[in-house]
Image (tube, helix red, strand yellow):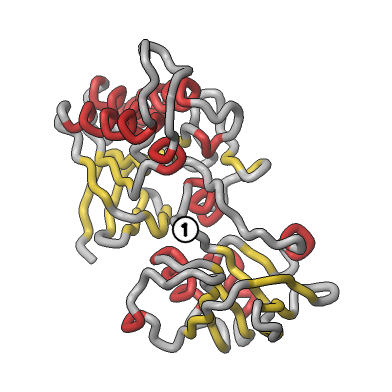
Amino acid sequence: MDRKNEKLIIAGAGPAGVSAALYATRSGVTPLVLHKDGGALETAKSIENYYGLPNPVSGKELYYNGISQIEALGVPVRKEELLAISYDGEYTVQTSEHAYHAKALILATGTKRNTLALKELKKYENSGISYCAVCDGFFYRGKEVAVLGNGIYALHEAKVLEPLAAKVTILTNGKEPSFSPDELGTIQVNTHVIRSAGGDPNLAWLELDDGSHFSLSGLFVALGTADSTDIARKLGLYIENNHIYIEADTSTALPGLYAAGDCTGGMLQIAKAVYEGALAGTEAVKYLKKNQEL
């Protein structure tokens, strides 16, 4: 992958990400904005409760208007799926297309609305069900594990586990894989639907829709695309009620890393996301100036 250097990267192009880009640009830093899609906003049929809208607009229209607004200011916006982020004094952002370096980073990719509809989910969290291959893969070395998902993010997590586990299977839960079979290596794919889970005290098997039991020691959930909370877990940030904990200025425990929008919890509203994005964009530029990165 190509490696590209940036001062500031914003992950997400919804209300929080676009607002952060606007305020960072007006403060003197043109960020790079990376996004996969519009998430919850893009699928909203009608937006009526936001300032300055005498008539309802669709979420899709508002989403693309926001992107057009920052592009008009010269902000580069790239449609690339976010896969992983690491920190070693600066941030390395890995997407489906490139690897980027950045001095500061704003997480604004929203939060997932989809999860595994499994009644035993909570029972086995931290007892066989994990959301982070980088964090927990070591504990499953030499064991048989599975990754739940059908996209590039699931394949990425499976690749992390491949050199550690005895066997890695991607469980698509009834969906068609969206990755190429040529990329699998030793990784297997199972497309059956998961019905239930069992094991005492740890996860040991999944019952599939054909009545069979799929034996495993660990299940790594990687549904859809990686959202801000997925990334935050891998960076070791504090997660509270599945949301990223931030300070009043939207900063996190890592220097130069900010979070804004639905991923921080609270009111899942456009107005709140725009405010946090504006604050995150402003604070990120302050950080860069303070650390003489400009």
**Residue shown at the point (59%, 68%) measured from the top left:** 220
Camera sees residue 290: no
**Residue shown at the point (38%, 39%) measured from the top left:** 42
Q: Nearer the viewer, residue 272 or 60?
A: 60
Q: Give x and y (percent) for residue 141.
A: 60, 82
Left or right of residue 43, residue 235 in this image: right
Is 35 placed above or below 203 here?
above
- Disc 1 is placed on an element classified as loop
Q: Nearer the viewer, residue 189 or 154?
A: 189
**Residue shown at the point (34%, 58%) measured from the top left:** 94
Q: Give x and y (percent) for residue 226.
A: 46, 55
Q: Give x and y (percent) for residue 43.
A: 42, 40
Q: Nearer the viewer, residue 141 or 224?
A: 224
Residue at numbered disc 1: 224
**Residue 209 figure quarter:** bottom right
Left or right of residue 85, residue 73 in this image: left
Q: Amino acid at mark 1?
A: Gly
**Residue 31 figure quarter:** top left
Q: Nearer the viewer, residue 249 or 35?
A: 35
**Residue shown at the point (48%, 85%) measured from the top left:** 188
Is 254 placed above or below 172 here?
above
Q: Quadrant of the N terminus?
A: bottom left
**Residue 129 figure quarter:** bottom right
